[in-house]
Image (tube, rainbow, N blue to C red):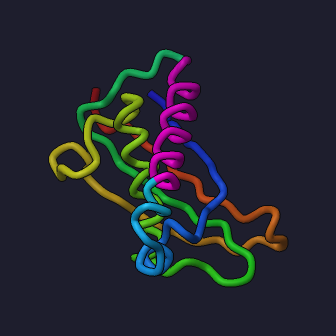
Amino acid sequence: MESITIEFQADSRLSKNGLRRAHWRSSQPLIREARERAFILGRMEMEGGWVTPDRCRVDVRQFWAGKPFDWDGLATLCASTLDGLVDAGVMPVDDDPTHVVSYAMTAERVQHRADSRIAVTVTPLSV
């Protein structure tokens, strides 16, 4: 079984620092939108016959130009995306180490800001 990867443009307002500065009324629509976007992208990727794995690995890759997110900011930024992937059935849960065996974060520099993005990959370890 292959992996599923979704890519999206990072919204710094969803990072740890961005959420700290914002009022919950302004951040909740952003969180909801990110979760719905991940749900739609996850469902589109699942059309090839994806079966929700019992155990999986999650890799978050940051493509950055300028200044990268720090690791805790990146984790916070991806939280609603992971929730959307759970909603879509790409992964069973996102907060149980018996199901999500490992999380990994990497960063890669790109030349232009237009190429900046976040890629989240779910790799099944068992079905």
Highlighted range, magenta: 29-47
Who's the residue at 66% across and 57% down the image? 9
13 inside magenta stretch:
no
- Is residue 36 positioned above or below 109 on the image? above
Identified at 49% across, 63% down, the residue is 26
Is residue 34 a member of the stretch shown in magenta? yes
Question: Picture coordinates of residue 87 (x, y %)?
Answer: 36, 33
Residue at x-position 51% and y-position 51%: 120
The C terminus appears in which quarter of the rendering? top left
Looking at the image, is 105 positioned above or below residue 109?
Answer: above
Look at the image and tell me in which quarter the N terminus lies: top left
User: x, y (%) of residue 86?
Assistant: 35, 37
Q: Is residue 32 left or right of residue 115?
A: left
- Please identify the quarter of the rendering in which residue 73 is found: bottom left
Q: Position of residue 4 (x, y in %)?
A: 51, 37
Occupied quadrant, residue 109: bottom right
